[in-house]
Image: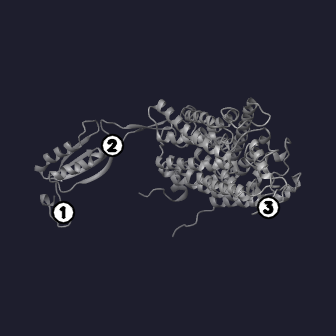
């Protein structure tokens, strides 16, 4: 019985983080009311006259349809079919992170770090859940003070009126589903986005620094971007007419850019690129990728927030684009390197899933085919050639797959909405204007997340340090940070 | 007495075991090993990153035999494991100073 208790170092700082956030959250509602032009703007369900349509991440045409249906019996009513699907979709999206993404990443690292990425994904899931409940949901989706065409503070960030889920009751509705379900559905998106970043700095980040970074990044980067894109009239990018059905900008470009920034700020792994760092268990990776594929139906078809034709088409185009991209990556690799690889086809599927995400509410089957081919080929080139050429150590290709796939998808969303059997561009836009709007959305997301992630990482590096020591890195994070090993054979 | 040590392709292990039983071998020791010979290693490619794998997996089979058994045992191993392709492996024959059966204490050829 020597020393059972660790020095406070890591745990202490995490405790302070949570404590500080709770403190902010307590003060928040009163602050927000002072700032907010419409203090009563919190929309809680049945008696609310205006349905909370602005809160829904669907394209505007879709919203019009939804409200038309919803408003027939004077005000929104709960639809049990929609609710049943959204409950299911929420579970599917959570399944994407734990275990899907966690396994996808775990297989690609070396055996000595397998637990560290599983731990990171699991801890992020838990941390984000609490933060989302405390302030995240309110910051992303509260619509207080928002007005179409008016750019003010609330175009960038929601008020804290819904902090601690204030006013989100059993009777609250978002469209035709309980707001609790909508809130949890969105929570699963907020979980997977930071978890995606893990792949960029795998095998070298301190766990305490990771928790700090992810907590702050969720509130200062994810919540504002989600708000700007999805929270409805008055939100910055929503008013620009940016189409992002399920999270091309909010989730994938956001995570991909934060990933490359993190990879650059942390620096290369010791020995990269001369030391061999092959995936230690591609079986896990393929299992994880397959779970991502299945879970993604919840992600994309669930973003319709209804069990309707939009959800159906979202499911169809998701499947088509994913399969196409898997083949595109496989054949590209076959041509370039002589053999088709398992890691390649699985990566291609993920690239396709990423790219169809923003387009899944507006593209038709032909558009899905186009997006799949471009994403599979483009992400293959980014993850193999571009990475080699530039020499950055984005360990598991978060940039190559998520940022590049996200950008391809976001821009092609504009193209495929207006042509190839798409649902149509934003009202009043030409195809060209839609593509320009998409590019603006991409640019804004890259700039915001790039700058903010850089600042956060630099600050944390100065205050607590981001990287493990060289010895810890050599020993492996499993033993060095967790006193455990993944395999006792 | 001699110790015959054969480095063979892993998938030929069952054939080798059967062939050795047929020539009267009572027991063998098998170890999974890695190494390289003229076959050299191979390359692996993960998302464009190429790694040269220098050491290939092989199986080491050790058989302790009497002097008279050496020839048939070596022949049996060759016959069972040869594919004619590079990487079939090698056989080493060593002098064996002593053998003891732990259970009974028997020594020498009786212990084989």
**Circle 1 is placed at which residue position?**
B101
* Residue A302 visible in image: yes
Quadrant placement of the C terminus of chain A: bottom left
Q: Position of residue B62 (x, y in %)?
A: 23, 51
| Disc 2 and disc 1 on one polypeptide chain | yes
Q: In front: mark 1 or mark 3?
A: 3
The residue sitting at 87% across, 57% down in the picture is A40
Q: Position of residue B47 (x, y in %)?
A: 51, 38
The secondary element bearing badge 2 is classed as strand
A221 and B96: which is toward the camera? A221
Instruction: Report how far apart the C-alphas of labels 2 and 1 lie in the structure.
Output: 31 Å
For disc 3, the chain is A
Colouring of the image: one colour
Question: In the visual, does B70 lie left or right of A328?
Answer: left
| Disc 2 and disc 3 on one polypeptide chain | no
Instruction: Report how far apart the C-alphas of labels 2 and 3 lie in the structure.
Output: 67 Å
Determine crowd level at label 1: few under 14, some 14-19, many 20+ residues with C-alpha closer than 10 A.
few
**Circle 3 is placed at which residue position?**
A167
């Amino acid at each position: 019985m020597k020393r059972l208790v660790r020095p406070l170092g890591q745990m202490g700082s995490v405790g302070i983080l949570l404590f500080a956030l709770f403190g902010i959250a307590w003060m928040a509602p009163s602050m927000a009311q002072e700032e907010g032009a419409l203090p009563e703007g919190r929309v809680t369900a049945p008696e609310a006259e205006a349905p909370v349509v602005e809160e829904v991440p669907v394209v505007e045409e879709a919203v019009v349809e939804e409200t038309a249906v919803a408003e027939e019996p004077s005000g929104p009513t709960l639809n049990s079919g929609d609710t049943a699907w959204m409950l299911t979709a929420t579970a599917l999206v959570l399944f994407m992170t734990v275990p899907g993404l966690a396994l996808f990443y775990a297989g690609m690292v070396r055996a000595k770090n397998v637990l560290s990425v599983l731990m990171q994904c699991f801890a992020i899931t838990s941390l984000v859940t609490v933060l989302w409940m405390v302030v995240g949901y309110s910051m992303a989706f509260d619509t207080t003070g928002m007005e179409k065409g008016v750019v003010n503070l609330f175009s960038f960030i929601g008020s804290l009126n819904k902090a601690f889920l204030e006013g989100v009751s059993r009777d609250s509705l978002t469209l035709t589903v309980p707001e609790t379900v909508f809130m949890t559905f969105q929570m699963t998106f907020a979980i997977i986005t930071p978890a995606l970043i893990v792949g960029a700095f795998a095998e070298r980040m301190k766990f305490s620094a990771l928790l700090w970074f992810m907590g702050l990044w969720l509130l200062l980067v994810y919540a504002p971007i989600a708000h700007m894109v999805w929270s409805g009239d008055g939100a910055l990018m929503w008013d620009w007419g940016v189409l992002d059905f399920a999270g091309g900008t909010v989730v994938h470009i956001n995570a991909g850019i934060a990933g490359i920034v993190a990879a650059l700020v942390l620096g290369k792994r010791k020995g990269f690129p001369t030391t061999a760092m092959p995936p230690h268990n591609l079986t896990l990776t393929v299992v994880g990728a397959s779970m991502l594929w299945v879970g993604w139906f919840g992600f994309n078809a669930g973003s319709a927030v209804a069990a309707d034709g939009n959800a159906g088409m979202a499911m169809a185009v998701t499947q088509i684009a994913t399969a196409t991209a898997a083949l595109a990556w496989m054949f590209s690799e076959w041509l370039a390197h002589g053999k088709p690889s398992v890691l390649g086809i699985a990566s291609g599927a993920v690239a396709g899933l990423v790219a169809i995400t923003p387009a899944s509410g507006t593209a038709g089957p032909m558009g899905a085919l186009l997006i799949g081919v471009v994403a599979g080929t483009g992400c293959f080139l980014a993850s193999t050639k571009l990475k080699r050429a530039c020499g950055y150590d984005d360990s598991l290709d978060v940039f190559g797959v998520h940022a590049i796939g996200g950008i391809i998808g976001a821009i092609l969303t504009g193209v495929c909405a207006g042509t190839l059997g798409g649902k149509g561009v934003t009202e009043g836009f030409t195809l060209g204007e839609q593509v320009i709007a998409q590019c603006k959305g991409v640019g804004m997301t890259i700039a915001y997340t790039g700058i903010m992630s850089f600042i956060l990482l630099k600050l944390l590096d100065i205050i607590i340090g981001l990287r493990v020591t060289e010895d810890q890195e050599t020993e492996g994070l499993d033993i060095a940070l967790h006193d455990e090993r993944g395999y006792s054979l | 007495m001699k110790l015959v040590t054969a480095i063979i392709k892993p998938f030929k292990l069952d054939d080798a075991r059967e062939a050795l039983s047929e020539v009267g071998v009572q027991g063998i020791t098998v170890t999974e090993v890695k190494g390289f010979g003229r076959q050299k290693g191979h390359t692996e490619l993960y998302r464009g990153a190429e790694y040269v794998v220098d050491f290939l997996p092989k199986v080491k089979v050790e058989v302790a035999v009497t002097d008279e058994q050496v020839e048939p045992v070596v022949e049996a191993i060759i016959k069972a494991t040869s594919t004619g392709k590079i990487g079939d492996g090698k056989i080493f024959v060593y002098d064996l100073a002593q053998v003891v059966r732990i259970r009974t204490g028997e020594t020498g050829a009786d212990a084989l």
